[in-house]
Amino acid sequence: DVKVTQSSRYLVKRTGEKVFLECVQDMDHENMFWYRQDPGLGLRLIYFSYDVKMKEKGDIPEGYSVSREKKERFSLILESASTNQTSMYLCASRGPGGTGELFFGEGSRLTVL
Amino acid sequence: DQQVKQNSPSLSVQEGRISILNCDYTNSMFDYFLWYKKYPAEGPTFLISISSIKDKNEDGRFTVFLNKSAKHLSLHIVPSQPGDSAVYFCAASAFTWAGSYQLTFGKGTKLSVIP
């Protein structure tokens, strides 16, 4: 089974703090994604990466950056957290092929005070 | 512009009855459709999918129907069970300029199955 592990299930940070969200997958997948989920807004793509050191902006990249130094690891960075970044963050990975099926981690609930 | 729409934010169904969750899309380039299920405080899990060359796919209690001319798909759960209570996301896949398939998600429908 594919396993996608997110480092922190729950975080509480203060406005202006730098936040790192880590994600590791164990299936040698090329593609990795960061989404955020908010009530009434569904899943919105922040950034994705289709290879090491490659990254592409998703639908809502503002206020975020990412890092993919190793194939199995994809990090989401909030340089200066703000209260409107309080959300559930979901990491996902996908192997090659055309089905588009994503495998998700359990999510990281971030609260910014 | 929302390309994948789930117009019902919530749905309540009696245990044992059929649950029907609907999804509409606007992009004719979508060629693969998926349903994900999400419990609170967990990541979404894949439920069932359908290729655009088919009009029906069945897996146990779950059936997905695709009507390409109407750009509409639906998920049927029969019979519904209390454990099916979750948020269901419809997703559509298309090949993009970045050279990979991307999923576009709907906003989700919260299903409550009443015992």
Image (cartoon, grey):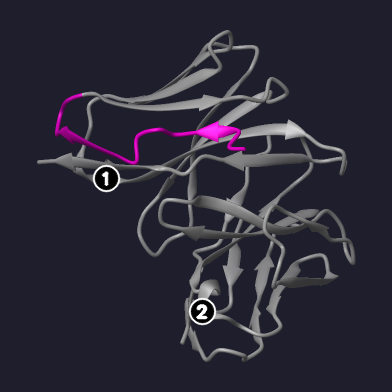
Residue B74 % position (x, y): 42, 22
Residue type at tag 2: Thr
Q: Chain of mark 1?
A: B
Farthest residue toward the top? B69
Residue type at tag 1: Ser
Residue at mark 1 = B85
**Residue A38 lies in the magenta stretch:** no
Residue A35 % position (x, y): 61, 58
Residue B6 % position (x, y): 44, 34
Q: Which mark is residue A112?
A: none
Foreground pick, B109 / A105? B109
Q: Is residue B62 visible?
A: yes
Dot 2, crowdedness within 10 Å: few (<14), some or many (≥20)?
some
Q: Determine whether A30 is above or below B114 in the image.
A: below
Q: Which mark is residue A83?
A: 2
Could you tell me how far apart the alpha carbons at marks 2 and 1 are, in whole angstroms?
A: 30 Å
Q: Secondary structure at mark 1?
A: loop
Q: Is residue A98 visible?
A: no
Quarter assignment of residue A21: bottom right
Dot 1, crowdedness within 10 Å: few (<14), some or many (≥20)?
some
Q: Chain of mark 2?
A: A
